[in-house]
């Protein structure tokens, strides 16, 4: 048996389909493998397994592994609000879950550095992030969504007192983690139009932005500022979402509108951007969110609110070229 045949025979059967070539000369085995679709950690594991298997052959003194991989085009969608307290993080988590249920491979970046909430919303508050070298490895949730958050990297309740450059570096680490075969990253932006937003728009290329607001004028003013920032950065607006749109009293069944009604849809029409839908102010959504069980993950009465919005986001992404 030639040395090249011995090398191929030594490679585990489950990896043989990934081998493009195997050569042997002067004690050196050179293996070229297709690692398309693998994340950095999986690629490193593949390299180790090949080196160990082939390196065990008596005639092999050195193993050189070259991994080939197609560059993956991963889309980024940012979710912003212009102000806090309007349900941006809840929308992001439920959009991610709904899109994952539709078949997309979705990751969530909790870019709200100072006030991270995605670990609670996605049920990973007790999970710690690990790293390989300088590369973070996202945490896998029970909903088929991978995620990273500063909330998983610091002690619970600890304040983060960082200036702009440190915030930008933290965002970079979250964005450039080992996201593997993820198709889409949903980025939960902090309120306002500050350092994180500017770093995101300058260093990455979002395919689009979803903006969320409550119906009252004060929230809409801030949402309009967020839209203006995205437009200045030439980030397309996928659409506006109205949150806390009506309250159904669990005791008497009466429907009221404590924050007004229809203001976000009217603002969308005035601004010339799509209106994606409404999410009501409901006790069930709050309870599910606090317990790490997004309504979009289950067959609940409020799941369709999020799946309907997610379908429009998916449709936009399917038709976009960015």
Image: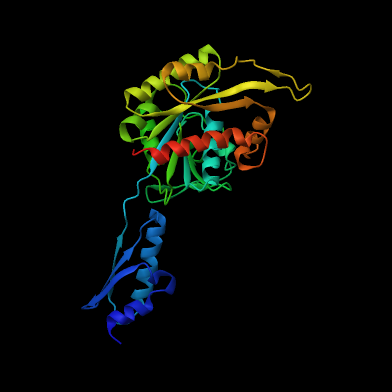
Vertical arrangement, residue 300 with respect to residue 21, above or below: above
- Choose top left, top right, bottom left or bottom right for residue 225: top left
Q: Residue at x 40, y 68 (%)?
A: 49
Vertical arrangement, residue 242 with respect to residue 123, above or below: above
- Left or right: where does residue 281 sit relative to residue 314? right
- Choose top left, top right, bottom left or bottom right for residue 255: top right
- Left or right: where does residue 233 sit relative to residue 180? left
Vertical arrangement, residue 128 with respect to residue 12, above or below: above
Q: Position of residue 161 (x, y in %)?
A: 45, 27
Q: Residue furthest right?
A: 252
Question: In which quadrant of the rendered image does the C terminus lie?
Answer: top left
- Confirm whether residue 165 shows in the render: no
The colour scheme used here is rainbow
Q: Position of residue 150 (x, y in %)?
A: 48, 37
Q: Residue furthest left?
A: 26
- Left or right: where does residue 304 sit relative to residue 81? right
Q: Position of residue 146 (x, y in %)?
A: 50, 46
- Choose top left, top right, bottom left or bottom right for residue 70: bottom left
* In the foreground, 57 or 186: 186
Q: Residue furthest bottom?
A: 1
* In the foreground, 247 or 125: 247
- Confirm whether residue 314 shows in the render: yes
Q: Position of residue 310 (x, y in %)?
A: 52, 37
Vertical arrangement, residue 118 with respect to residue 70, above or below: above
Question: In which quadrant of the rendered image does the N terminus lie?
Answer: bottom left
Q: Residue at x 55, y 41 (%)?
A: 98
Q: Residue at x 47, y 39 (%)?
A: 314
* In the foreground, 141 or 63: 141
Q: Residue at x 36, y 58 (%)?
A: 36
């Amino acid at each position: 048996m030639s040395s090249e045949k011995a090398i191929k025979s030594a490679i585990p059967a489950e990896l043989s389909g990934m081998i493009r070539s195997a050569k042997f000369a002067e004690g050196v085995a050179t293996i070229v493998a297709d690692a398309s679709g693998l994340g950095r950690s999986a690629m490193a594991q593949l390299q180790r397994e090949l080196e160990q298997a082939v390196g065990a052959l008596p005639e092999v003194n050195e193993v050189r592994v070259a991994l080939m991989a197609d560059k993956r085009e991963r889309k980024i969608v940012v979710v912003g609000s212009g102000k806090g307290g309007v349900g941006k993080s809840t929308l992001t988590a439920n959009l991610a879950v709904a899109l994952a249920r539709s078949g997309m491979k979705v990751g969530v970046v909790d870019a709200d550095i100072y006030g991270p909430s995605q670990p609670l919303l996605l049920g990973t508050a007790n999970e710690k992030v690990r790293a390989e070298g300088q590369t973070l490895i996202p945490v896998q949730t029970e909903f088929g969504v991978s995620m990273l958050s500063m909330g998983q990297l610091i002690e619970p309740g600890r304040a983060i007192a960082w200036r702009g450059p440190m915030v930008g570096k933290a965002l970079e680490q979250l964005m450039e983690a080992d996201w593997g075969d993820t198709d889409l990253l949903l980025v939960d932006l902090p309120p306002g139009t500050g350092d994180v937003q500017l770093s995101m728009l300058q260093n990455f290329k979002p395919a689009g932005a979803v903006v969320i607001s409550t119906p009252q004028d004060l929230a809409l003013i801030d949402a309009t500022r967020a839209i203006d920032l995205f437009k200045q950065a030439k980030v397309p607006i996928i659409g506006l979402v109205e949150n806390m749109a009506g309250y159904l009293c669990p005791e008497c069944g009466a429907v009221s509108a404590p924050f007004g009604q229809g203001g976000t849809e009217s603002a969308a029409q005035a601004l010339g951007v799509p209106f994606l839908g409404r999410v009501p102010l409901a006790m069930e959504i709050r309870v599910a969110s606090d317990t790490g069980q997004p309504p979009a993950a289950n067959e609940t009465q409020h799941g369709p609110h999020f799946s309907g919005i997610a379908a429009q986001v998916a449709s936009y992404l399917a038709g976009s070229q960015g």
